[in-house]
Every structure is written in structure tokens, then in C-alpha cells.
Image (cartoon, grey):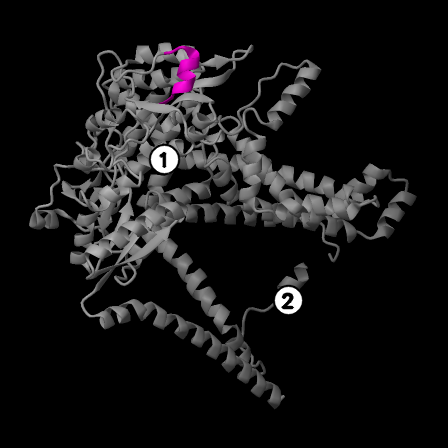
Amino acid sequence: MASHASSRRPFRWRPDQQWEGYLFILPSFAGFLIFIVLAVAMSLGISFSDWGLTGFKSFAGLRNYQQLLRDPLFWQASTNTVFYIVTIVPMQLALGLVMAVGLNQAIRGVTVYRLIYFMPVVTTIVAGAIVFRLLLATNGPVNSLLTTLTGALGVPFSAPNWLGSSQFSKWSVVILTLWKNTGFTMVVYLAALQGVPKELYDAAHTDGANAWQRFRHVTLPLISPTTFFLFIFQMIGAFQLFTEPFVMTRGGPANSSLSVVQYIYLAAFRDIRMDKAAAMAWMLFIVIFAFTLFQNFMQKRWVYYESE
Amino acid sequence: MQLKRTMSIGVLVLVMALVLSACAGIAPQAAAPTGEQAAAGETTTITWAFWGSPEEAASHKMVADAFMAEHPEIQIEIWNQPWDDYFTKIQALWASGDTKVIPDVAFLWPTPRYAAEGVLENLDPYIEASGYDLNDYWPGLLESAKYQGSVYGFPRDIEVNVIYYNKDMFDAAGVAYPSNDWTWDDFLAAAEKLTQKDANGVTTVYALAAEGGKWAKWVNQNGGAILDDYVNPSKCMLTDPASVAGIQFFADLMNNGYAMRDADLSQAGGDAAVFMSGQAAMILQNTSRVSAFNAAGMNYDVAPAPIPAGGKRWNGAGGAAWVMSSGSDNKDAAWTFLQWLQSAGGGETLYTERGEIFPALQSVANSPAFMTDQPPANKEAIITEAAASDVGGFGYFPEWDELSGSIIEPGLQTVWAGEADAASAVAAICAQADQFLADNGYPK
């Protein structure tokens, strides 16, 4: 992989290339220029301006950024988002892997199970959220179950107000996100597991490795590129979490489940502070970019590529 | 090879042609309204924007038809979006600056926020020129549509929050119906009898279901305030003992199990749902619930909200307003329509007759359009609350929505959830609010 990357040359015009190729990509490339590049450049400009509904008012320099750093709600939304990242990403990876390993066995009806576990991924999130709001209601099924279980075990328990208390609201968002996205992780892991050569297991078995050792020293290293991909992918997804808290708790109560992207949305469309929203979007971008670069750098330590 | 090249160029030309024809297909449609207008001669077409469900849109459509019957020279074109999309889409129209797509007359809230952006027309000159009567509005109501002292919109209705009570539940509990001058103490005595709890002390039937957002009534009744000035604030007033007591009164209703907690209420489907299902004997809400309760054939009536001993009656004066775009290219026609919408015999009467609104105009509220023989019987209660309308429910400066939505309401949610008491919550709120005001350059 690494050798491939270094042999690639930067873009250079070669006379033997057919120019019509560029005409063919022109429509989508023009769209990319206008709707992505231009929009991104505009948002950078807006973040350094005093910009309202009707457009440019004055140049603001770093004022929007300075305001944000002083804004307690921005910090609260950031803290919430960090909470989402450190809960959702590892739990999703672990659960997805466990499900994939389970469904990689020769068991009866395995296709049906795979289908069931993947179904939330293709389900409308709003419909899912409505069901979860009912499930997690104060006197809903989840709390009834927990009360019955703890009652049977004799453990003192008071039913949590999942959606209405600031201690639990983030967890209800985490639960919805896990339900919605773990199926995707599972499918990707399943594909990776099926790519692990059987001979390696046979060899390890011959060497006397037990099931756990085979998993730890054969499976895990061989699927580490997949883990790396999923890790980056889901971390970015968690940084950009919007729909889940929006439909589940609206960010409340007391902003306890508000995510950064939700705050960007509120700043832009509730407060009509396009400048503040753009500044926040750029800060988020810088953080995500830095994290991704860092992970990319760190992958040498734990990601194993077969081609190397 | 050559053939392949020719073919690929041919395909490309075809694709381009398709793309271009698709673009060309849109253009004549966009130009159509002006074409029709030219053909019809002197008719002017104005665009009228509002949010609302299909049922609400039907009312607006009926109003537009009534107007066009009276004013054949003006055509109304409707631009209707659901509430969730309305604001982002209308902002995009205004931001485009294209007078062809900007709605001439629009339904809007909050008016000062948009007036500050320069997208709304100052209505003062039109009011002066036509002698339009502003004194018919409920007291304090027009303040919500003013910016820097000028009127930028006409509130269509006024939110009048009254107590709805279930007569059957009062009868069953042996509680006398509320009087028009009942107090907080009377209310608490009734609430204790109306509330039903199970063996574990968990409430099964609540005396009251009221949205957390209704808290400003208790604060203002008790002589408290949110800000020292609602146009040009310099400090948060929620730490004032009268304000704290008002918030704590509401919080204690919830803490004692008399009132449903805000989060539980929204989970249960809102106050109309719990009132109709008998989970709550009373709700505090505006007049928008009347048609649903009448349709369900409920045995209910309304009463003014109870007031504290030594307190005053208070109703927050506010309602979404009709505004005119500063980018309108038919301002005279737009004004004719606006004025008609906000007149007795015009839009106000029609909306009121359909039970859609409690009118912004006092003359319409006191006319047969509102004083029908339909329930609720005690319409005087609504008039009494409306007459006590005043500023104090919200700020009239552009940053109010941000202050309220990001700091005040979230801070109070911890009180409604029973996680904090009023005094500690407002201390945190006011610290943040004062910083927010200073950051935004208040007082100006």
C-alpha cells in the first residue's frame, strides 16, 4: 500500500491522453467547484465577517472565533460531543465485532439474523426515534423491565428519566445511535472476517493456539485495516452527530444532549448568525482533520497490512 | 479509434444538450407569473407566505379568496411551507435578494430579529398615510412587532393563556369550579384535592399540565421580571426574589406531584392529549385548544389564571405577525392586503369566526365573531386575561431568541426536571445572561 502511494505522480498533462475525458467529467466537476469548493471558500470568508441574513456587513477578523471560545454553550456542546465520541465509537466497534463473529459461524438461519441486525441501518431514523422515545418513556417498557429485573434481584433502583433528565439524555442518544449504526459495522466486519485465510487458523491450531489466542493473534491483526477504517469513519460520524440528538431530545433538557453540529444549525437558522455558525463549522473541521491526521500517523503502530 | 472518438464526442454533445434543455425548461415557468400579469392588464400579483398544516392552509386560502373577491385588482399567490421548513426557506428567499421570489407579505416570528436584518418594510409611513388605527390592538401587543420604535408587523392574534378545567373531574373530586378572581392559595387547595396518587406516592392523575415554557406568567404575576428592559436590556432580573418565588411556585407544583413535569408532558403527547384523556384536570394554555376540545365534546370551561395574594393579573403580549418585505415589488398592493387582513370585517373576523385565532383586535374579540354560543362558556375569562396583556414575556431585541433558547430556557429546564431549585438555577442563568448582554453590546 505504502509503495503504491509513493509511486503515484502528481497531476501532469500527457500528450497521449485524450482530452475528451475531461469534457466528460466537466458537468460533475463544475458541480463540485460550485457547490463544494465555492461553498467551502464562502463559509471560510463568512466566518471572518459580520454576516447576517442579507449578506456581508463588515469584516470582523477573528471576532467570531473569539466569541465562540468565550461562549459557555459552545463548550458544553463540545463536551457533549466528546462524550458521544468516547461512548459511541468504542461501543459500536465492539458490538459490531461481537455480532460479526457470532454471525460468521455456520448456524441455522444465519442470513435471517444478519438481515435483522442490518435492518436498523436502512430504517428511517425518525421512525426509530419515535419508537425509542416510547420505549424509554418514564413509565415505558425499558424502565418496567429494569424495575422488574432489579426488583427480582433485590437491588435498589429508581427508574431513570431517560429523555427528561440531564444525566440520562445523552445516553438515550447513544442508545439510538448504537441501534441505528451497529449493523453497518457488523456488515463491514463480516466481510473482513471472511477475508481471513483459513490456512492461518489451521496453522495456529497446529501450533496449539486455543480459540481466544487464534482470535487475538490471527483474526484481530488481519482485520485491523477494517478496524482502522471503521474507527476513522465512525469518529468523524460521531463528531458530526446531528440527527440523533435532534430527533431524540432536541438537544435538551438544559442543552445536556446538544451536539456541536446541532448548535451550528441553531446559530445559523434560529439566531441568524451565519458568521458564528461558519466559524463553528471551521473549528469543527480543524479538530476532525487534526484527529484524522493523528490517527493516520498512529496507524503504523497497530494496523497490519498483508501486502507489507 | 477515430470512430470511438467521434462517438464519444457525439455522446457528450447529447448529454450537454439534455442538460441545457433541462435548464431551459425551468426558465419559462419562472417567468410565467409576470407574463400572466401583463396579459390581465391592471391586476397585481402579490405572494403571501405562511406556515401551517393543510387545515390551517385551507383557512388562509379562504381568507385569500375573500380578499380577492373584494379586491379583484389584486391576485394573491400562496407560498405555504410546514413550520419546520418555513424559516430556513424564507431566509433563503430573502438572502437571494431577488424581488421576483421574495414574498410580499409573510407570517413571521420574531419580527425584531428580521427587522434588524433589513428585510422588512417599516410600516409607519403606510399607517400614517392611511390613518390605520393602532389603538384597537390589545395593550403591549404591538411592541412585539416593533423595532427601534417603528412598527414592522401586525400581530394576527394574541396568545392568551387561561386555565382550562375538566368539569367532570372537579365534580368527582368535590371541588368548586374556579372563580374569576381565584388566588394561588385557592389553586393549591384545589390541586391537592384533584391530584390522585398511587400507594408509592406516584401521581396517577395530575391537577395541572402546563408546558415549562409558560413560566413567565407566574413570574410576572408575582411582580418579578426577566429583564430590566425588554427593548434595551442591561441586566437579567430573574434573581429578583419575586421572580425566584414565581419560578419556585411552578417548580413546587411539579415537585409535589400536582403538575406534570415538562419532559413527562411532552412524552405524554402534550397538554391537549393529557387533558382529553383525563390524566390532568387542568391545563394552562392559549385559546388554540378550543376547537379540539369542542370537537371531542368535552365537558370543560375556562377560567383566568390564579394570581398570588398581592400580585397582579398578567398575560404575555405576543403573537406571530404579518409583515411586508422591504424587497417587495408591489408594496402598495401588499399594504392594501395587510390592512384588510388586520381589520374588523376582514381577515381578523374571518380567522376568528373559524375558531382559528383569538383576535389581535379588541373590537373583533368583543364582536359576535368571538362571542359565540359554543363552549367555553366563560369567554369573559379570556377577555379578562387579554386585557391584562403586557410586555414581560420576552425581549424585543434581535438577540432575544438566542438568549432565551440557549441560556434561559435550558437553564430553567433543570428546575422543571427537579434537578435544581429556582434560586440556584437563576443565579447561573443570570450570570450567563448578563455576560451575553455585555458581549452583544447591551445596553445600547
Q: Residue at x 58, y 27 (%)?
A: A140
User: Badge 1: few (under 14), some or many (20 or more) residues near its Cα, within 10 Å?
Assistant: some
Residue ID for mark 2: A7
Foreground pick, A260 / B203? B203
The subunit letter for the residue under badge 2 reads A
Which of discs 1 and 2 lies nearer the camera? The answer is 1
Q: Are marks 1 and 2 on the same chain?
A: no
Question: Does residue A28 appear in the picture of this structure?
Answer: yes
In the rendering, at what x and y percent does residue B29 appear? 36, 69
- Find residue B28 and report its horizontal and vertical position in percent: 35, 72
Please tell me whether residue B134 is drawn above or below residue B125 in the rendered image. above
Taking the image as shown, residue A222 lies to the left or right of residue A272, namely right
Q: Is residue A12 above or below residue A52?
A: below
Q: Which residue is mark 1?
A: B291
Is residue B166 inside the magenta stretch? yes
What kind of residue is marked 1? Answer: Ser
Query: In the figure, B147 relative to B175: above or below?
Result: below
